[in-house]
Image: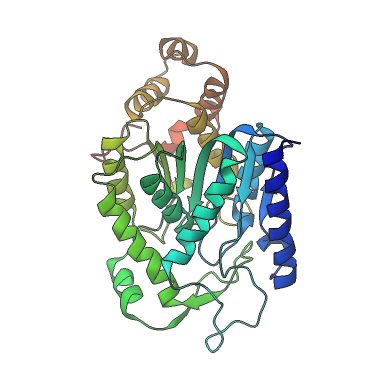
Amino acid sequence: MEVGIRKTAQIIEQVLQAESVLGLKNEACRSQFFIHPHSTSKVFLFLHGFTAGPYQFKPLGEAFFQAGYNVLIPLQPGHGRSGNWNRQNPPPLPTDIQIYQQFVLEWLQIAKTLGQKIVVGGLSTGGNLAAWLALEHPQEIDRALLFTPFLGSRYLLFDWLIKILPIYFEWFNKDAPGNFGYKGFRMKALRIFLQLGEKLAKQARSSVCVPVLMVCSEADKAVNRSKQQDFFTKVLKQQPKSWYYCFDDSLHIEHRMMTKLEDNDYEELVIILAKAFVESDLTWTQFQQMAKRITQGEAYEYIKQELNLDGLASQYLSAMMTQRFGCDHLECINPSEEKLI
């Protein structure tokens, strides 16, 4: 085993031991690490959503591990702990965004020991943290996978309430299948992510950014899609190799889109999409053109030759285009919100 890998393995073992002593709600909340006995060409750092846990990224993490990459899915500060949490005794979620930012920076350094190129990804508030890394440290990161980042609530009224109400709030779907995290939280613990989302929107106007995959869904009732599209538009001006995907409402893919355990019966679509983006160097314009030509009946093999696609990129793009719920069920929207498919 390589020296760097051995040292990192010791760090990971210490993290897992600390979680055992700390006491977690269940095994699903434990940090997930999929590590080969050697450095890999890419290493993935995934960040779960607010009040949730690493279980959200287990299917995608395993898929990239099986593809030959190292994967880190750490439990975030204050999350996943066992306890009788309620209004009088809320879960210990941080209310200072710097705690999360320092956390992801520490894991970014760990990721460097495991692979040549670092890919960061996150769901919801984890997407905010991944976007922050992509904008703040583009020289250290290869790509960012943003799954329905929390850049604002679907309704502006909710944003206003999040900013002013000093209350304890319980999720409406707190008893939904696959919800292994906290059922409630202090509003100010979520407020810091809304404020981070607002800062990211401003920063994206001028900051250099790595290629970004933005994934959202029409059926997502939690977040503001127009703000996601606006963020993507700003990123695209700086980084043309970014992609935007919005799952059609007919698939009923809601906010918790990463696993079948939660709201997504089609988790394989998320996995194929992520793989296609990571392995491809297509620009957004090229990808739109390719998708449109395929839906119009043009042979994929001809397009592949024209775009000089080979290896894994071709494999994953072909799989994505030929899935039962492939591009004919995916809404590909350009920055001007013109539907091409």
Q: Residue at x 43, y 25 (%)?
A: 281
Query: In the image, residue 135 lies at what x, y percent?
Result: 36, 46
User: In the image, 89: left or right of 192?
Assistant: right
Q: Nearer the viewer, residue 207 or 191?
A: 207
Residue drawn 57% across the image and 18% down it: 311
Check the image and name the residue furthest to the bottom.
88
Measured along the vertical axis of the image, is residue 23 above or below residue 36? below
What is the residue that sits farthest to the front in this orientation? 3
Residue shown at the point (67%, 38%) measured from the top left:
65
Can residue 331 be seen from the camera position used here?
no
Q: Is residue 242 left or right of residue 10?
A: left
Q: Is residue 328 left or right of residue 18?
A: left
The image shows residue 297 at horizontal and vertical percentages of: 42, 18
Residue 170 visible in the displayed image: yes
Quadrant in the rendering for residue 220: bottom left
Q: Residue at x 42, y 21 (%)?
A: 294
- Say how many tags the image has: 0
**Quadrant where the N terminus lies?**
top right
Is 291 drawn above or below residue 21 in the view shown? above
Q: Is residue 244 above or below residue 184?
A: above
Percent of width and height locating residue 248: 43, 44
**Relative to 95, does residue 41 appear above or below in the rendering?**
above
* Horizontal and vertical percent position of residue 177: 63, 63
Colour mapping: rainbow
Quadrant of the rendering where the C terminus is positioned: top left
